[in-house]
Image (cartoon, rainbow, N blue to C red):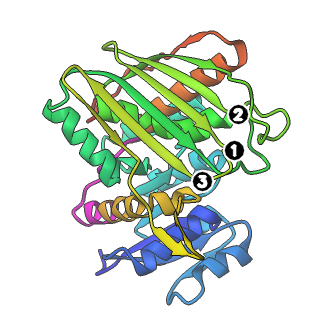
Amino acid sequence: MADLLGVAVLGAGHMGADHVRRLDGVVSGARVAAVADPDTARAAEAARGIDGVSVHAEAEAALDAPGVEAVLIASPGPAHEEALLAAFARGLPVLCEKPMVPDSAGALRVVEAEARLGRRLAQIGFMRRYDAGYLRLKSLLDGGELGRALMLHCVHRNVSSPPHFTSAMLINSSVSHEIDAARWLLGQELTAVTVLRPASSSGAPEGLVDPQFVLFETERGALVDVEVFVNCGFGYQVRCEAVGEAGSARIGEEHGVLVTARGGAREEVPQDYLVRFADAYDREVQAWVDAIRRGRVTGPSAWDGYAASVAAEAGVRSLEDGGRAPITLAPRPDLYAPAGG
């Protein structure tokens, strides 16, 4: 391996361009070797000013570009399966943004393909596992200070949803983060989900069921509830409270920047996830690079990506029919650790 890990970034949209910036200017031990996007002008803009980077319209061309030793996938979800399998075929380690694959059948194909290799190559981009608050909450739960976990109460709010957002995407795009966080924090698989529909907000686009209230059951009897509200209008908020037999702990209410001006004071609320979780993204990508340079792949696995896809699909079924939907996973290959591992 060269002094700097050469990374191909697939996708140069909002998330991909931010990762290009991060790899070039924040993360140590890596460099951007290639950027791919069907919109090559957008890819070129993301790569502007970076020495030695090549720009491509096709993902596989970027994977085969000189100097590429690893892949960061930030393209739209439907393109992930093909890109992951292409990286596996080349033996390239991958950091893949969530959803790993939007549908559970495709996600299971990725799990099976990696299991056939007999070694992990994929880390999935559930960045909350790298957030300081979530890490502290995980430490409290694992250390037993809160006693046996009984409930998680979660809030996930966005300023507004993009034009293409659907009611199902509140679950399979937004709540997918809470799905992974719950499995990781509790060390348990989710077994069932029920989605309730409060009256939709007047700020939601016509036809969008927003907000939603999602209730997950786990294999050892804990409950996880999620308020997801993607058109709240005022800011980006993510909160989580763990309630145990011996205590509780809540994260996500840290004070932001206090601005005093024009005779008054106000506290700034983050407006999107790239602001709220900037440090978590930095730690996530740094940990990925460091692990690869040690010859390892760590962090959330392809199994975690698959489990999230199955749970999200069950949530969409519940949203559509109003009932309780079971969450049933395929047998877990020996390559992967249990939930929370």
**Residue 35 visible to an observer of this rendering:** yes
Q: Does residue 217 sit above or below 262 in this rendering? A: above
Q: Nearer the viewer, residue 180 or 274?
A: 274
- Check disc 1: other Cα within 10 Å, few if <14, some if 14-19, many if 20+: many
Alpha carbons under labels 2 and 1: distance apart: 7 Å
Residue at the spot of label 2: 210
- Magenta span of residues: 288-302
Residue at the spot of label 1: 231
Q: Are marks 2 and 1 in contact (CB under 8 Å)?
A: yes
Alpha carbons under labels 3 and 1: distance apart: 9 Å
**Residue furthest out toward the front:** 263
Alpha carbons under labels 2 and 3: distance apart: 15 Å
Q: Position of residue 177 (x, y in %)?
A: 48, 40
Residue 24 occupies which quadrant of the picture?
bottom left
Instruction: Please state which amino acid type lies under the numbered disc 3.
Output: Gly
Q: Which mark is residue 235?
A: 3
> Residue placed at 29% from the left, 50% from the top?
298
Residue 220 occupies which quadrant of the picture?
top left
Q: Are marks 3 and 1 in contact (CB under 8 Å)?
A: no
